[in-house]
Every structure is written in C-alpha cells, then in structure tokens.
Image (tube, rainbow, N blue to C red):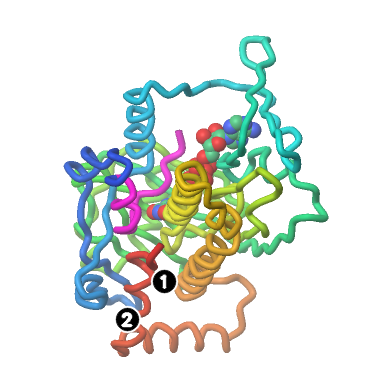
Amino acid sequence: MKIRAGVLEHGFARLMREAQCGERMDREGEIHNGFCIAHDGVLDYVDLQKHTGGSSVLVYGQTELTRDLYEARDRLGGKVVHNAEDVTPHDIDSGAPFVTYRVGGETMRVDCDYVIGADGFHGVSRKSIPADKLREYERVYPFGWLGVLSRTKPVSPDLIYVKHERGFALCSLRSQVLSRYYIQVPLTDKVDDWSDDAFWAELKRRLPVEVAERLITGPSIEKSIAPLRSYVAEPMRYGRLFLAGDAAHIVPPTGARGLNSAASDIYYLYHALLDHYQNGDDRGLDGYSARALARVWKAQRFSWWMTMLLHRFPDRLAYDDMLQQTDMAYLLSSESALRSLAENYVGLPF
Ligand SMILES: Cc1cc2nc3c(=O)[nH]c(=O)nc-3n(C[C@H](O)[C@H](O)[C@H](O)COP(=O)(O)OP(=O)(O)OC[C@H]3O[C@@H](n4cnc5c(N)ncnc54)[C@H](O)[C@@H]3O)c2cc1C
C-alpha cells in the first residue's frame, strides 16, 4: 500500500472521536504544536499553538486510520465487499439508483437511496456523471515528490519544510521510529533512477548543515513518486450521487489538506443524511455541494500557495524568484501572515 497522509487537522481528529474510532489515534498519534521551515541555510519555527490560540495538528498515518475505520465497521457488523470488479453506478439521476459490481464471477446489485462516490481520483463515480454536467478546474505541476519511508529515528521531532535552490524537501514522520522524507524531482524521473544512497545524498544537500549532520539514514521500506496536481470538479452532486474526497478534488500534498478535505466532505454528508433520515429535512443534502466546495476551494488556495512558496519551478523568471523570496521574508516577519498560515494549517472550521 502507498504510504500517504500523516498530518491530521484537529477537526478531523474530532470527527474520528465523534465516530467512536479515535481511541488508538489518541493513544498513538503525536500532537504537533508547530513545524519548521528551512530556507537559506536557516531553520525557522512556526508556532501553531501561539498563532491559533491553542490549536495543533495530529501526526497519525493514513494506513492506521484506515485500519481503525475497518475495525469499527466490523464491530458494527457492517458489510465490506473486497476485490469488487466493474463497480458501476446506474440511474443516478433517477429516484431509484443502484450499483452493480462483480465478485467471484457473479454480478451483484445494490439498490440505493443515495450513492456516495468516495472512490478516489481514478474511481468510476465522477466518470459516471455526464461530461456536460461537470465543470473541471485543473493545474498540473511540472515536478513530483519522491518519498522514502525508513525505520529510522526522525531527524527532528517537528516536520521540516525545506525551500532550497536544488528543490523542495520535506522531513516528516509517522512515529519516533518511522521517518518519511520527500524530495522534489522532475516528472521524468523514475523510482528506479534513485538508489537509497542517491536519495539520502540529495536530501542532505537540501537540508541546513546542522540538520543534515543529524540525519540518520537506513534502507527504504517504501519508495514512490507522487505527481503534484490541483483539481476540482463541480458540482459535487449529480442526481442521487454525491462525490466526496479525491473523487471530486485533489491538492498537491504540500499543505497536507487532501485527506483532511475528504474528511470535511464526509462531515457535511453525514450530518445531511442524519437530517434527512431523522428529521425529513433535505436542506443539508441540497446544500452539500456548495457548502463542501466553499471549504474545498480554501484548501486548494492554501495548498497552491504552499507549493508556490516552497518549490523550485523550471522555466521560472528571475522576477518569480524574487517574488518567492519576498513572500518567504514577509511570511516570517509578519505576525498576521504567520497567523494566516497557522489558521489554514491546523484546518479551517467545518
Ligand atoms: C505523497 C502524499 C502525501 C499526502 N499527505 C497528506 C497529508 O499529510 N494530509 C492529508 O490530508 N492528505 C495527504 N495526502 C492526500 C490523501 O492521501 C488523499 O487526499 C486521500 O487518500 C483521499 O481519500 P479518498 O478516500 O477520497 O480517496 P482514496 O484514498 O484514493 O481512496 C479511494 C478508494 O476507492 C477505491 N476505488 C478506486 N476505484 C474504484 C473502483 N473503480 N471501484 C471500487 N473501488 C474503487 C480505492 O481502492 C480506494 O480504496 C497525501 C497524498 C500523497 C500522494
């Protein structure tokens, strides 16, 4: 399985607790009250608690979250179908939608009140909406992130975002014995082009000397390249199909918003469905797309801004470099700018 998200907004953690799935997350997740930005050979600390009046983020791996959710589903006796093939939504613009899938050579049918398409960017849900009913916004960035997971002590207890003339880097972690590091690479690079030694050498070049000297390296236990993309499909509802998460929107991982945005969609949908079934009130369902998109676009803006601030763009102008440097200098010298960064990083309210 690909190792992805690790930084959870405090609102997401609250949602996990509300769903009674937060026990292990609270026990094993790590509270982070801030993070570092490395630039020009120096390290600056962004104090999330100070700039948000007490908020923080939780570091807890997406693979662990998924395990907790599966276990909670099992406790409730819910049915999860694995290895389903040819999953297809039908009649989603009618009052009686249904989904078919194939498992073990047999075709199955599920009749539904509503279908929730939470099947990621490459799933079938969004593709089952007629093209003329969907508006798509997209930006593809001219680089990717090469990520390595290693069973080594993290170089720092805090995440370090690195702006460097050789390209962006990120020192992240899953726990105090499991490190996750990333470096910006050209889109043409393949994982096989990067031996572990080459990865560690390049990471060290991009870190401030005092950090590079502390870095403990080891064999990679996972290595992959993720392309960076910003994407939004509107609206997030078509008939009785509701899109949620990466099925409707993607952000570059720079601001750690992707999984968090999926969670806020689910928060809105969950409460809308409760209102529908418990009170016969459809306002939440009718307003879902507009409400979710308002927050989605703010996550898009923040992720785009973090990406522009920290990455090295090929074909950039000298003017762009100066603006990027000025953006960094302004950020680190302005209480208001730091407050805005912190407010977005811990997560805007649902
Ligand atoms: C390198 C990297 C780092 C990241 N770091 C962060 C972070 O720190 N914080 C953060 O918030 N986000 C982060 N993200 C983003 C985050 O991982 C995604 O936004 C999140 O996984 C989206 O969840 P989802 O459930 O919408 O989609 P997915 O996680 O993609 O899940 C979709 C599911 O649908 C299933 N599926 C797909 N197609 C079909 C089909 N045809 N039929 C049936 N099932 C199907 C898939 O098997 C999968 O189980 C990161 C992403 C990357 C790549």
Q: Residue furthest top?
A: 105
Image: 10 above or below 179 = below
Magenta region, residue range = 1-16
Question: Where in the figure is residue 317, as x and y percent of width and height?
Answer: 61, 83
Residue 4 magenta? yes
Image: 31 above or below 37 = above
Question: Where in the figure is residue 47, as x and y percent of width and height?
Answer: 22, 73
Image: 122 above or below 172 = above
Q: Secondary structure at mark 1?
A: loop
* Residue type marked 2: Leu
Q: Are marks 1 and 2 in contact (CB under 8 Å)?
A: no
Numbered mark located on residue 109 in the image: none
Q: Does residue 231 appear anywhere in the picture? A: yes
Indicate left or right for 26 with 317 as reference: left
Q: Earlier in the sequence, mark 1 or mark 2?
A: 1
* Residue type marked 1: His
Indicate left or right for 47 with 206 as reference: left
Q: Secondary structure at mark 2?
A: helix
Q: Nearer the viewer, residue 262 or 100?
A: 100
* Residue identifier under label 1: 164
Numbered mark located on residue 338 in the image: 2
Indicate left or right for 252 with 13 as reference: right
